[in-house]
Image (cartoon, coloured by chain):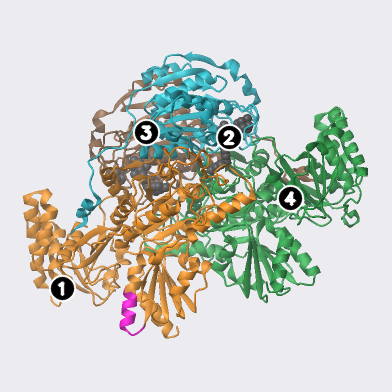
Chain colours: A orange, B green, C cyan, D brown
Amino acid sequence: MTAGRILMDAAAEAGLYGLMTRSLGPQIRGGESAALVRLGTRPVDGLDDICDLLVAVDWGNIERFAAEIPLAPSSLVVADPAQGPVPEVIAASGARVVMVPFRDLAAAIPDGRVNMVALGLVASLIGLPDATVPSVLSKTLKRKGEAALTAGLQAVTVGEEAVATIDDTPTLDLSQAPTGREKWSISGNDATAFGVLRGGVRFVAAYPITPATEILEWLAVALPKVGGCLVQAEDELASINMILGASFGGVPSMTATSGPGLALMTEALGLGVAAEVPIVVCNVMRGGPSTGIPTKSEQADLNMAVYGLHGDAPHIVTAATSIADCLFTAQWSVYLAEAMQVPVIMLTDQAMGQARAVIDRPADVAFVGRRETVSAQGAMAYQRYAVTASGVSPMAIPGTPECAYTADGLEHSPRGTPSTQAAHHQEQLDKRLRKITGFDYGAHWAVIDGAGEGDTAIITWGSLTGAAMDAAHRLRADGIAVRVISVRLLSPLRPEVVAEALAGVSRVLVVEQSHGMQFSRLLRAHLDLPGSVRVCARPGPVPIRPHEIVAAVTAWDKGE
Amino acid sequence: MTAGRILMDAAAEAGLYGLMTRSLGPQIRGGESAALVRLGTRPVDGLDDICDLLVAVDWGNIERFAAEIPLAPSSLVVADPAQGPVPEVIAASGARVVMVPFRDLAAAIPDGRVNMVALGLVASLIGLPDATVPSVLSKTLKRKGEAALTAGLQAVTVGEEAVATIDDTPTLDLSQAPTGREKWSISGNDATAFGVLRGGVRFVAAYPITPATEILEWLAVALPKVGGCLVQAEDELASINMILGASFGGVPSMTATSGPGLALMTEALGLGVAAEVPIVVCNVMRGGPSTGIPTKSEQADLNMAVYGLHGDAPHIVTAATSIADCLFTAQWSVYLAEAMQVPVIMLTDQAMGQARAVIDRPADVAFVGRRETVSAQGAMAYQRYAVTASGVSPMAIPGTPECAYTADGLEHSPRGTPSTQAAHHQEQLDKRLRKITGFDYGAHWAVIDGAGEGDTAIITWGSLTGAAMDAAHRLRADGIAVRVISVRLLSPLRPEVVAEALAGVSRVLVVEQSHGMQFSRLLRAHLDLPGSVRVCARPGPVPIRPHEIVAAVTAWDKGE
Amino acid sequence: MDGESMTHPNPQDYRSDVKPVWCPGCGHFAVITSVARALAELGLARENVALISGIGCSSRLPAYSTVYGFHGVHGRALPVATGLKMARQDLTVLVAGGDGDGFSIGGNHFLHACRRNVDLTYIVMDNSVYGMTKGQASPTTEADWDGSKLTPGGPGIAPFQPLEIALSAGASFVARAFSGQPAELTRQICEAICHKGFSFIHVLSPCITYRPEQRAYKDKVHQDWSQPASDRTEAFRTLLEDDGFATGILFRGSEPAAKPVERPRVALSDMETQFVV
Amino acid sequence: MDGESMTHPNPQDYRSDVKPVWCPGCGHFAVITSVARALAELGLARENVALISGIGCSSRLPAYSTVYGFHGVHGRALPVATGLKMARQDLTVLVAGGDGDGFSIGGNHFLHACRRNVDLTYIVMDNSVYGMTKGQASPTTEADWDGSKLTPGGPGIAPFQPLEIALSAGASFVARAFSGQPAELTRQICEAICHKGFSFIHVLSPCITYRPEQRAYKDKVHQDWSQPASDRTEAFRTLLEDDGFATGILFRGSEPAAKPVERPRVALSDMETQFVV
Ligand SMILES: Cc1ncc(C[n+]2csc(CCOP(=O)(O)OP(=O)(O)O)c2C)c(N)n1
Ligand SMILES: Cc1ncc(C[n+]2csc(CCOP(=O)(O)OP(=O)(O)O)c2C)c(N)n1
Ligand code: SF4
Ligand code: SF4
Ligand SMILES: [Mg+2]
Ligand SMILES: [Mg+2]
């Protein structure tokens, strides 16, 4: 892991972009793990088809990881001969295997570590400028003292030298790398955390859960520095209700969780809808159902996020389209929640949240949550749930004189008193729907590449966006014009805008990572997709790769 | 309430069918209430368009109820002059109003009660045979002693006599009433309770909630008589997990709840899906979202029931189509849960659950839950989650030697040990989906009236079935051939069978009681409805009446 | 107790015009009256007070008062109040509800609110029954009460001990009152509001409809706890002798209330540096 | 304890071949060993025992044994076990989990399981941390433990008192053990299984990874409670002196365990009569 991160930072110093995801075994701590790094001269939002280079310092339980590390005859595998014969699953790929005695090389250096030897080898193999790794290494190992740094630098050098024993090595063309831009190295979870902070969140309550905990840990440290606070709750029922309380008090609030926690929050989300209390819940998806596969990624909480509330409970569901976009989408989500006084569920996933990317410094966007409030009014004239044209009723914040009201999950009159009357129910249901369907979301509802182009549309969402964009790039290179639509606003899904973005195509390929084709069904439920439709869906944890999307489109071309 | 029930039982003695629903005000106890009774010579599964006869013993808060009691110029309103002038909302309907001094008449009798006078009046007005009301009254008031009975009988007689002051009264043609059939008077909630008992349920855990509590109360008394038991849990999280535990132990189990409670159960429902533990959850829908309108009906928990679980978690959702059908659907639900080792959510609603009907004795159906189990096997050979062709893996019940396994919500291998491997995940997801999509549900997936007939299909579900059937009846009488499909198996919605039932129509009218058109969207998500589609949807609490459905179809005919 | 005071307010100023749904004679009437009196006595400005509740007859309280209210979902009043107070230290936050809401479905939040010691005043109107859902046994119902069809013959479980649990869980103010003695109840509410930390008042509040025998509470209660213990162990010893009908303030501790941590302020733009490569 | 006995079983017969995910040195290893030993000692047939858990490192226990197991969701092991035992009185039902699972998200079920007194044996492996999610504070964590980024500077809350709460809530068997003393733990598990009613064993079980300082537990524990109290008040008095490291069986009550009510049998067809008009 450490080696992977240093490699990526070093590449960033050389002007490259990068992405690093991790795959862990079942052991709580220690045990096997794999770091998957992709580097590029353009921003990297997803993994590539195959792994060009695999450095295996040991083969422990490689079967568990093999599905997530695709190899081909063009791949180069560097392994330690002391770890025994090349496993069948690797050999079967046809990849070229070369041997480097990592352990022996490391053992020859006092305090030498195997992963540092491997790091030096990789950096040199792909041709990173000589100074970059040592430079990052000295920053990283600074705290560990002089001896550790010396050992690290030595090990790296030994690794670099070992490259000489390998011929015909893959390299990166660094000349294409942009220079002079400020680069950030950030994980999706940190980006989400910083995004909600930028959006104005000042209160968080939460219960830890994999893979969302890092969002909370980042905010626990950051919030007190901006006058806010985080409360660790006894469970998710408490955390969601705590943020409803804080937001009722006028303070923009959020929590983060994953599937099982979101399931426990749906009752209170409905309360947020009915009582019109803005909150943001970031749900970092993992493999489901039930406890499922906590450390791996999937896009299968979409149904619950969109439909999981009882009664007619319109609310907003957004999804980040990349690690960098976690920041934008988080900030936008806070903005939407506050503007419409409605709960927003923001979806990301493990593949995004726990991965780290080297990206361009994200632009500062203007979205800061701002709620329509009232100041002191004539005595008792205040109607908390006034029926307005926009559907948004100005909200009194405790402390405002003459406007006290009771927020209520019981159906109510405009004033907020409980009512069982059909007319009040209809009126409030209409109002709560109107405020979110009539809102001007601008162009942010989706990220579109190749707008208006071609006969084929690829429509996707979330962490598959990178693969879809890559696929489109290749298809265009092959002369097939396609457009890619990655939907950021999953609910309310606005049929008109989706239809407009699809106008002119005769084929739609839906790409998603769920066994139940949840995204495709969601689209169908709201609009008639034009022309013929195919779905490229697979459950987690193995992500859909660009070549699979390319293949799906070209198979269609061939009439398959 | 009592008077309404006596009236209905008396009508039943005369061979009539009936339906009684109640509408309550907000007071916890006492306060205003209205009993709506419909009688007929054919089974009555829904309310009619208008109320033929309204007996108002007082006008207290009539505005609250007016929307639920439609009047027309043809209606007869009988009111007590001492209660003041006829309210505007009643007068505006154009109904004929006649005055009867209920209170004075009752006051003239020692211990005379107003509602008994009204009962006598109504029974006589509609022409029930003289003996029926006294006969039911003596059974009902038996426990209250001789004096109460005498007072009751006297009051009824006084009421009957008061009819002489009214001319041109509505009567029922009793000659059409079938005779000699065994009739039951049963509420939807009692029917559900008896249905699950027939299905084999022997353990229930629950937390009280309106309007589901009666199911639980009935079962609390009945279960010990068949060797079972009911546990009142501390909350819904406990109750759903308790029934998972009992069912893991081999005992068919269920719970009942309403929207807010179901919201708290979704995490554990997902566990039931992943660990393959059969359970039945009966959800009696009330107005939503959030606390909503607890005492009134709506069909808006459909989304949550179908989609409300995190991850890809295929399970079964059924819906009763009438009060009588609560019995069948409950029993069938237990059968399905046990046969497929899967959670079943059965939907009914307040309008069905808390209403009472006079019906023909329901047939004894053969569906009794039976689980595929294993007996002692060779040591350690047992695979709890074996991948089978049907998708159903035989289950070992604790107590069976050599088959001990661990039921798990973590993804697992066929043996049941935790696994994060893509292949295991795919295999188990496939299996869990296959077992419910490949099952032979026979014709029970829907109640169909007029199969294959006409150009127009009305597709609906739940407590609107009666109104849809009534509407179809009238349309046919007007020469418009229609078919009605009321879907009992809402999930998995099987596109082929629905399409087959719709074959040949060019128009589909979807009828449902939800603001968000949840049923219509569910259908769209799974199949292309043939021809043109219209949706007749309205939130609760006012049910959709037959004439509205007729109007929707005829408007179409007129090209509106 | 925070926020500015009103000049000589009247208890009526804290009562709204919404008609309670309660049955005539319900013990809960005296609780809303006592809350209004206490707020008037302390002269708290209405806009600086929030009254949070869950679901149940008792939980209807907020709409009947003129302070800010939040009528949430069943069992979750304490978390809502905790979030509000942690985000808005300037408000006085009261929480009200029933024995079902607070000790059954809400039991976990009760435990953790006692421990957390956020400055809230929690009033539980205990009638040993679920009034709202028409009379089922609650955690404080006697083991042999057979008034509910859901538990024929009685729940058969030893009743929940609210004060013992509150003390064990770490509540810093623990009292018991009877709704039939509104003056004492008012006094306790005032003291609880003034106490810095989590205050719990257990109010015996009869349900006239489903537990008519609770009318006899008035003959059973006895004000024994005239001086609050300041030592938890001592309070425990007192409680070991309790018959469930002693009233008064049992315990008042001095642990500091939980508050958000204060840290030097940092501009958002300065936080960005941690991401720069 | 129910069901038939095996003849001279070996503790190994109760251990599965599944490799634990635990870190080397984790306290939980000794707990599965002790459970296996206790089952062997009592000679319980594997098929008549069920081991139920929630989610956490500790909750992984079931898969490592050869009895029937249910690895449910986080915090809900007790209800699963309650349902199982109420439906299947013939089985011996054990429940195992962590301090987060049992006292944080599962706190309400803990309270009500203690009250309900169903015949279960509940073993909580307390390491005062959430091991599984990589080291956050749990309810039993010290107020000033600053090892988690989620609560910088420490959770700041007085630790939850499992034994006091269990006693207050009505548990009928309450004990504490240390996973470093497996013989005593085994003895307690045997006694708890044999006890008719809800038994709670609080096991101090170090998390070597996130709380390495807990290695010192071995120097802190002291077996003080050699004779269980049979009087709840007496047990309470003992507990008022507890430093959190006393081990032994604190209390053993004699309230009858909850069981399904027995009623004369009625045929389903006879029940129909109530509906006939
Ligand atoms: C999640 C959920 N479950 C159940 C209910 C039904 N319910 C409403 S109030 C109540 C109990 C109220 O009892 P208590 O808190 O003692 O208040 P009381 O009415 O006695 O004052 C219940 C079970 C609900 N509203 N929500
Ligand atoms: C509903 C839900 N929320 C959160 C989690 C994440 N989670 C898994 S285990 C755990 C805590 C485990 O701590 P503990 O019970 O003390 O067990 P330990 O790992 O320390 O043995 C948490 C918070 C979850 N699985 N489900
Ligand atoms: S039911 Fe009981 S608690 Fe509810 S309002 Fe009536 S008397 Fe009060
Ligand atoms: S993290 Fe702690 S509790 Fe979990 S296995 Fe490792 S040592 Fe044990
Ligand atoms: Mg109560
Ligand atoms: Mg722990």
| Mark earlier in primary sequence (2, 3) | 2
Q: Identify the residue shown where x is 50% and y is 34%.
A: C102
Is mark 4 in CB contact (under 8 Å) with mark 1? no
* Amino acid residing under circle 3: Arg
Image location (x, y in percent) of residue B207? 57, 40
* Amino acid residing under circle 1: Leu
Residue topped by disc 4: B69
Q: Main secondary structure of the magenta part?
A: helix
Image location (x, y in percent) of residue B206? 57, 42
State the extent of the magenta-drawn residues as a range: A470-480
User: How far apart are the alpha carbons under marks 4 and 1?
Assistant: 78 Å
- Does any atom of ligand 3 lie closer than 8 Å to the CB of label 4? no
Are both tags, 3 and 4, on one chain? no
In the displayed structure, does residue D220 sit left or right of residue A533? Answer: left
Image location (x, y in percent) of residue C175? 46, 22
Q: Residues within 10 Å of mark 4 (few under 14, many from 20)?
A: some
**Element carrying mark 3:** helix
User: How far apart are the alpha carbons under marks 4 and 2?
Assistant: 29 Å
Residue topped by disc 1: A174
